[in-house]
Image: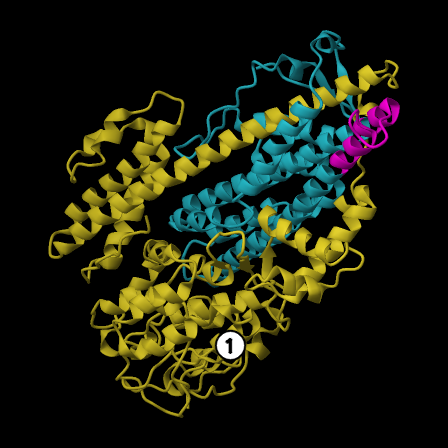
Amino acid sequence: MEARPLSIQRSSARQLNNLGVSGPMSSSLPVLPTPLEDTFSKLPNSQQVYMEQELRTRPLAPAPHIPANSGVVGHIFSSSSGLSSDLQYSSASPHEKLPRTTSFISQSSTPIPQTSHSGLPQSSTSSHYTKESSSSWCPESLPGYVDFAANTPVQNSQMEGSSCSGAIVSEEFSKRNDWHEWADQLITDDDPLGSSWNEILADTSMTEMEPKMSYQVPKTPTSMPAHRTQVHQQLPASSTEIRTVVTPSASANNAPAKPRMRWTPELHEAFVEAVNQLGGSERATPKGVLKLMKVEGLTIYHVKSHLQKYRTARYRPDSSEGSSEKRLTPLEEISSLDLKTGIEITEALRLQMEVQKRLHEQLEIQRNLQLRIEEQGKYLQMMFEKQKSGIDMLKGSSSNQENSSTSLAKSELEGTQVDHDKKGSDTANANSTNEESSQPKELDGKQKAPETEAPENAELNVSELSSQPSKRPRTEE
Amino acid sequence: MKFGKRLQQQIEETLPGWRDKFLSYKRLKKLVNLISSSPPPSHRHCVEAEADFVYLLNHEIDKFNAFFMEKEEDFIIKRKELQQRLQRVIDTWGPNGARPSETNCKEDMAEIRKDIVNFHGEMVLLVNYSNINYTGLAKILKKYDKRTGGLLRLLFIQKVLKQPFFTTEVVSKLIKECESTIAQVFPVDEKEIGRREPTIRVTGEGVFRNTVAALLTMQEIRSGSSTRSQFSLPPLDLTDSEFIRTLQMNSPPIPIPIL
C-alpha cells in the first residue's frame, strides 16, 4: 500500500488534483463519497450533496494504468492517500471522479463498497465532457479548471430547462448505457430529499466513460447543487393543482425533506370553501378539508399548517402578521398636529399609500429591467457559445486565432450589454454581435473591465477545450 | 456608498422580524475575497472557500424562499380575511345593511382602511425584500466572476430567476388588488390633498417608515456607481414625487436628497 498517510485533511486531498505527484494516478481518483454521512457530519446536507456533485463531475482519466487494489473504488478519503494504491481501477469498473473540492475529505479510510450506480445529477453535466475523447488528463489542465468550472455553467444551463433534473439528465444519459441507472435515480426527485441524498451519498461510482474520459472537468457546483437542491416541481398552474417547491433544509442532515408548499390565491379559495362547508375554521379538521379540496399533491401537513394560520388570522387579525412586528399606525407617524381628526388620519393613510405605491412601481420597473438584462446576457452568452463551438471545430488552428476570436466574442457579449447603461452606449458593439469573429477594433475603452477579463477568460476557456471539439450544447433559451 | 452599507441600512430599517432574513452579503464578500486572494485555483484554501461560497449561496436562496413563501401564504390568507371583514362591515353597518349605522360604519371602515394600507405596505416591503436580495446576489456573483474569472454568474442567476422568492407575481397581483380596493372603497377627497405639512416626520417602526426607508435606499443604491456595467440599472427617477422630498426619517433624520 501506499506509504502515504491516510490522514487526509481538507486540504491535503487537494493534492490529489495536483497530481503531478502520482503520475498516472493523477487523473484517476475515484472518489467515493459513500460514508459521507460520517465524514460530513459537520457539513449540512446540501453541502454534502454539493460536494458529491463536485466529485461526480470530475471525470477521471481512464485509469487502466492504475493498479487496482482492493475492491474499493477510491473513496474520497483514502484516495488522497492511496491515490495510487487504494484506487481500485479497472477500466471496466466505474470509478469516481475526482473531487473538486476536498473539504469534505476527512480521515476516513473506510473502504467504500463499490456500487455501480449513482443517481447524480452531475452525471449529466459531466457527460458533456465525457463525450470528448482525450487521451489522458494532464495535470496542467488543472489550472484551467476553475475557468472550466466557469464553462460548465454553460452546459449546465441546459439542465435548467426543466424543473425536473431527471428529465434533462435522461437526455444526456441516453447516450451512455451506464448512465441509464443514474437517470432513473435522478428522476426520484420526488423523494424526500433525505432519501435522495442518501442515495447520492451511497453512490460510489460515477461510471467513468472509460478511456473516453478526457480531461478533468471541474464543475461549477453552483448550478448543480443549487439545481438539485431547489427542485421545483411545477405542476401545471391550475387552481386545482399545487406547486410544491422542494427545497432542502440546509440544516437537515437527518430531517426528511419538507416539500415547501406554495399557496396561491386560488388554492386558498378552495381551502376556504372546504372549511366553510365543514362548518367554519374552528370545526373543520385538516383531514376533512384535505378530502374536500381534492387537490393532488396536497398533504395533510400542508393543510394543517395552513388551517392554523387561517384560524389565527380570523380571530386575531393583527397578530397573524407576526408578533414581532410592531405595526404602528400612521397616526404616530405624522407631524405634531392634532392627530385625532379623521382628516389627518385619512391624509396620513393616503400619503402612506402613495409612498407604497411608488415603491412598488419602482420595484416592478427594477425587476423588469433586471430580467431583461439577464435575458440579454443569456442570449449573448449563447451566441458566444455558438461562436465558440464553431471555433473549436477548427481544432487545429492556432490558439492565437482562437483566442482573439473568442475574446472578441466575449467582448461583444459584454459590449452589447453596455446598452443598458445610460452612458452613451456603443451601438457598434451591439451590432457586431452577430458578425463572425472579425473586428477586434470594435472593442473600445468603455468596456475596460469586461474587456480585460474577456480575453483572459476566453483564453482559458479555449485552452480547456482545445483538445476536444466540444460541441457545447445550446444554453437554455 | 457601497451596496453592503446600503443593505445594512435597509436591514436596520426593516421590520424586526425580517432582520435576519436578508442576504448575508458581507459573509459572501469575505468568501470571494478569500477565494481571489489565494491565486492558484488548486490551492486548498481557495477551493475550500469556493465550496463554502457556493454552499452559502444555496443556503441563502433556501432561506429567502422559505421566508418568502411563508409570507406569501400569510398575505393570501390576510387578504381574504380583509375582504371578508370589509364585506361584513358593509353588510352590517352600511347604508343597505342589516343595521345601518353611519358612525359604526365609519369607525370600522377607518380601522379596515388602516389595516389595508398597512397590509399593502407590508406586501410592498416583501417585494422590496425580494428585490434587494436579488440585487445583492447579482452583485456578489458579479464580484465573484470578476475576481476569479469564472462564469458562475450567468448560470446561477438564471437559476435564481426561477426561484419562488423572485417570482413575485402573486404578491404583486395582491398589491394591485389592494390598491384598487382602496381606491374604490375609500375614494380620495380632492380637497384633502391641499393640506400638507412642510415636513412629515416618519417615526416608529411601522410599515410606513419601512417603505420610505426602502424607497430611499433603492434610490441610493441605484445612483451612480463606480462599477457601472452592462448589468447595472439606471438611476432611480423620483423627481416627480415632490411629496417624497418632504418626508423626513426620524432618528436619525435623513433628509431626502433631491434628485
Magenta residues, as a range?
Answer: B85-109
Question: Which quadrant would residue A379 be assigned to in this image?
Answer: top left
Image spot of residue A148 (x, y percent): 33, 57
Residue under the point 33% across and 63% down: A142
As drawn, A222 above or below B187: below
Can you tell which chain is drawn cyan?
B
Residue B254 can be seen, yes or no: no
Left or right of B77 on screen, residue A6: left
Element type at marker 1? loop
Instruction: Name which residue lies at 11% across and 57% down.
Output: A396
Chain letter of disc 1 in the image = A
Q: Color used for chain A?
A: yellow
Q: Say which residue appears at 88% left-offset and 23% top-offset.
A: B103
* Tag count: 1
Q: In the drawing, does residue A394 fall left or right of residue A146?
A: left
Q: Quadrant of the N terminus of chain A?
A: bottom left
Q: Residue A412: horizontal and vertical position, in percent?
A: 26, 36
Magenta portion: prevailing SS class: helix
Q: Position of residue B84 (x, y in %)?
A: 73, 40
Q: Is residue B103 magenta?
A: yes
Instruction: Report which residue position mark 1 lands on.
Output: A8
Q: Which residue is more in the foreground, B152 or B73?
A: B73
Percent position of residue A26, x then y: 33, 75
Q: Amino acid at mark 1?
A: Ile
